[in-house]
Image (spheres, rainbow, N blue to C red):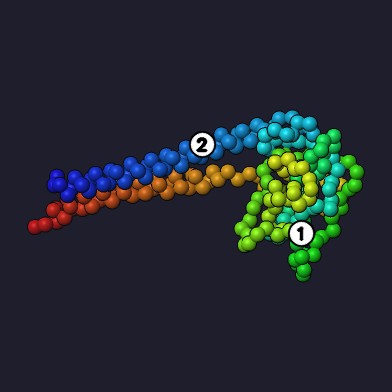
Amino acid sequence: MTRHGWLVLAAALLCAALTARLGLWQLDRAAQKLALQAAIDAEGQRPALANADIGQAQLHRRVALRGTWVAEHTVWLDNRPMDGRAGFYVVTPLRLAGRSDAVLVQRGWAPRDAVDPRRLPPLATPAGEVEVAGRLAASPSRLYELGEGATGAIRQNLDPVAFAAEAGLKLLPLTVVQTSPGTGDGLLRHWPAPDLGLHKHYGYAFQWFALCALILILYVWFQLLRPRLCRQQQP
């Protein structure tokens, strides 16, 4: 084999090894996500936490809280679809009974008015102490937003730290995704399951392994089979 042939072989093997390694890395990432999903499922099976227990609780843990709604500080997060329809996520602080702090509750979803997108649908928020069941989550998902965050009832995003100062509330650094039925509030709670991106990692792994196989096939064809066929066809 000539020097050029050795260089081509080395380059092909190096590229094949690199792409194969990248494919294995994506499979490893998928395995990590599977372990994380198992941990999330395990947290969801543990007993629900009450008011006194949620200060240092784990995300995705079930809770059963008692408190009063701070209805005047309800926020409607715009451009949040559910069941293929455009609408709002309704977020209301819940002042916890027996404590001085509150927690943001993602209460559910309400449709957007097709004629006037700024018109809010009616929302029944009971007065007095209520019980809310749900699961602990991070802050509401953020969407791309130009400029500084808006204030008012309808917003694109909600910054819990800024909102706590604005509302004069001491908020816990987490939220509750409500799963219990509301008392006639008319909100939907078909919350999507947490997406850990498993299919993305499997897709990337397939692409890297396919590229690895393509590199090896091209090397075999152009460096081994094609030259041999050309020699056999010569008179």
Q: On the rendered image, what quadrant is the C terminus found in?
A: bottom left
The answer to whether any part of residue 152 appears in the image is yes
Relative to residue 90, is residue 24 depicted above or below? above
- On the image, the x and y values in percent for residue 87 come to 73, 59
Query: Which residue is found at the position 55% from the left and 45% from the top?
Result: 197
Q: Would residue 17 be found to the left or right of residue 46 on screen? A: left
Q: Please, what secondary structure does the residue beneath circle 2 have?
A: helix
Relative to residue 111, is residue 115 depicted above or below? below
Query: Which residue is found at the position 71% from the left and 30% from the top?
Result: 46
- What's the residue type where badge 2 is placed? Ala
Q: On the rendered image, what quadrant is the N terminus found in?
A: top left
Front in this rendered view, residue 58 or 134: 58
Q: Quadrant of residue 17?
A: top left
Dot placed on the residue nearer the N-terminal end, 2 or 1: 2
> Any mark on residue 31, and which?
2
Relative to residue 48, is residue 68 depicted above or below? below
Q: Nearer the viewer, mark 2 or mark 1?
A: 1
Q: Please, what secondary structure does the residue beneath circle 1 have?
A: loop
Q: Quadrant of residue 53?
A: top right
Q: Which residue is mark 1?
A: 152
- What's the residue type where badge 1 is placed? Gly
Front in this rendered view, residue 159 or 220: 159
Front in this rendered view, residue 232 or 73: 73
> Any mark on residue 112, and which?
none
Contact, CB < 8 Å: mark 2 with mark 1?
A: no
Q: CA distance from mark 2 to mark 1?
A: 43 Å
Q: Would residue 92 be found to the left or right of residue 45 on screen? A: right
- On the image, the x and y values in percent for residue 170 come to 77, 42
The answer to whether any part of residue 220 appears in the image is no
Mark 1 neighbour class, 10 Å CA radius: few under 14, some 14 to 19, many 20 or more:
few
Q: Would residue 193 be found to the left or right of residue 124 on screen? A: left
